[in-house]
Image (cartoon, helix red, strand yellow):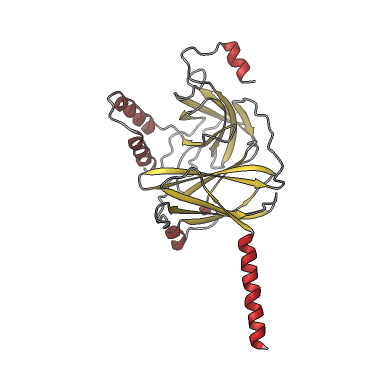
Amino acid sequence: MFRCSKLIFVAILLLLGSCTEDNQQKITGQPPGPYKMTLTAPHRIEVGQEVILTTEITHSDTGMPVENLRTLHERRVHNFITNLDFTNFSHIHHEDFNALKAEQIESAKLSFPYTFPTPGKYRMVSEFTDSKRSWIKHFNLEVGYSALINDHHLKKTNTNTVQNYTGTLSFASQTPIAGAPIEMEVYISRDNVPVSDLKLWLGSEAHVAIWRDDGKYFGHTHAYTPAMRQMMGGLAHQKKSHATNPKMIQEMMLRMMSQPSELIFEGPTIPVFYIFPQPGKYVMHFECAPNGNPIVFQFIINVLPSAKILPTHEHAANEIQ
């Protein structure tokens, strides 16, 4: 009788374990490369219900975990989550909830809780750093009714108000052009008064996540510091003498971002440097921390194609309606 009961108990445990496993999906991040990153999440994600999202990073050739991922901007892996109508956005990490344990660092397997606020199609982009460069993987998720298609018309705007803060985006040149470097600046006010109490947030005055409106061409950048400006000037000089390459740029950027954090821009403006890879409408999530309180401004901008003859003002105005 005891033996029979024990067998039944074991069978129940196996069944429960199987059900738990069956309720999870494992998604392989794209694009492929020397590192493989997987995301484990429930097969069915319900709106408003907290779920656990787990990422795991291995070497593609050996399947072995990537041990001791580098900490960059105070986190091992940065995760950016948005629905594809860009009405929701999160910048989230394992360490926001629990300190990393030795086994998690050794296995590169990190988890965090998340609650999806609305139904629809979502994209999560994860960024991690190993060796001498950073890598990006993206994952697609469906929340709620799978038939629901995000349909949100994005209108161009360079001003956004969050709580009692207002951010205004401006450009050093008139219009962003695909493939051309551009300097931007965000001016921040609180109750119509310029702020002067910006603080570092995750090691920078600003974290900027950028997508084109079709969810492609993700980019992540930070405040454009004098050190970064000096480095870009040096790279421009080396480019003229053909003494630079993309690998060198990656390594130089990583060395610079690995330096101790220093507050440079206290307000009311934060400069940003970026190169939009392709023309189209882009969504920019600009995260900063006036008085140490993180807020996110959203800007929608139009990037024109590179051409010898630029559109007239009339044509350009039509393109951004």
In percent of width and height, residue 80 lies at 55, 43
Kindly tell me whether residue 260 is visible in this rendering. no
Task: Decide: is 293 above or below 48.
Answer: above
Task: Decide: is 104 above or below 237.
Answer: below
| Picture quadrant where residue 168 is located | top right
| Picture quadrant where residue 26 is located | bottom right
Residue 48 as seen in the image, left or right of residue 28: right
55 or 222: which is nearer to us? 55
28 or 292: which is nearer to us? 28
Residue at 69% x, 34% y: name it.
Answer: 151
Residue at 48% x, 58% y: name it.
Answer: 100
Residue 262 as seen in the image, left or right of residue 138: left
In percent of width and height, residue 158 lies at 59, 25
Kindly tell me whether residue 184 is visible in this rendering. yes
Q: Residue furthest bottom?
A: 1
Residue at 42% x, 43% y: name it.
Answer: 134
51 or 75: which is nearer to us? 51
Residue 34 as seen in the image, left or right of residue 267: left
Residue at 66% x, 74% y: name it.
Answer: 12
The C terminus - image quarter: top right
The N terminus - image quarter: bottom right
